[in-house]
Image (cartoon, grey):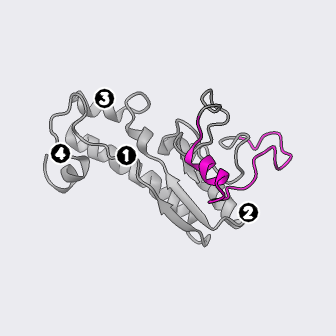
Amino acid sequence: AMGDSLTDEYAEQTYGNVAKSWTQILVDTGRADFGPTAAQANVTYWGEPRRTGYRDNWARYSDTTEYGIGHGQHIGAAQSVTVDGAQYVLIFIGGNDFHRYIAPAYMNTYDGTWTQAQSFAYADEVVARIRTMVDALDGTGAKIVIASPLEINWSWPGARSSKSAASCAASSC
């Protein structure tokens, strides 16, 4: 799996004693296998971005698509397929690229600093980085699932329209 805090295990976070990520819930219920944790594999630390979590979960909390590539999530996931035998790879990243406190897109779009063209160009960059992640898996034999973060729409505070980003992309807003 590749992604951000929605996919990363919560065990190493301050909220890990009261909450679990969807990956942990699937493992706990026997519905998915992300490989052993570092402790189960008698390894102290896998390294970034996995730390002590599951061997085949490359997600890292707070990652944007840029940071995910920088952390090597796509290279690690390809290794999980070719070396460790993973059959599926889920890519669930991109929400932080539009997060109010992590990336510039939110405020630059909604306070009018960016033009519509600049906002769309930024979205194109995010899509290109997701494409880079997919391309790293090409030829590995993995079945790839791309999950979209929650819809980012133009009805947030400071927005100029109630149209969704998808409808704006299909027409002129």
Considering only order in the chain, which callout, 4 or 3, is on the residue closer to the N terminus? 3
Q: Earlier in the sequence, mark 1 or mark 3?
A: 3
Residue 119: percent from the left, percent from the top? 27, 41
Which residue lies under the disc numbered 3?
A: 107
Which span is picked out in magenta? 19-47
Nearest to N terminus: mark 2 or mark 1: 2
Q: Main secondary structure of the magenta part?
A: loop
Left or right, 116 with respect to 63, comes to: left
Describe the element under mark 3 as helix, strand or loop.
helix
Please report the residue visible at 42 percent of the width from the left and 42 percent of the height from the top: 95
Residue 158, label in figure: none
Q: In the displayed structure, does residue 83 sit left or right of residue 134? A: right
Residue 83, image x, y percentages: 74, 64
**Mark 3 vs mark 4, CA separation in Å:** 17 Å
Residue 76, placed above or below residue 118: below
- What distance separates the C-alpha of mark 2 from that of mark 3? 41 Å
Task: Say what amino acid the circle numbered 3 marks.
Answer: Met
Q: Amino acid under label 4?
A: Lys
Quarter holding residue 136: bottom right
Figure check: 123 above or below 35: above
Q: How far is disc 2 from disc 1 in space, using C-alphas?
A: 31 Å
Q: Nearer the viewer, mark 3 or mark 4?
A: 4
Q: Residue 144: x, y in percent?
A: 52, 65
Residue denoted by label 4: 163
Who's the residue at 81% across and 48% down the image? 40
Q: Which residue is mark 2?
A: 84
Spatial distance from mark 4 to mark 1, Cα to Cα?
15 Å
Q: Are marks 2 and 3 in contact (CB under 8 Å)?
A: no
Task: Classify mark 4: residues with Cα within 10 Å, few (<14), some (14-19) or many (20+).
Answer: some
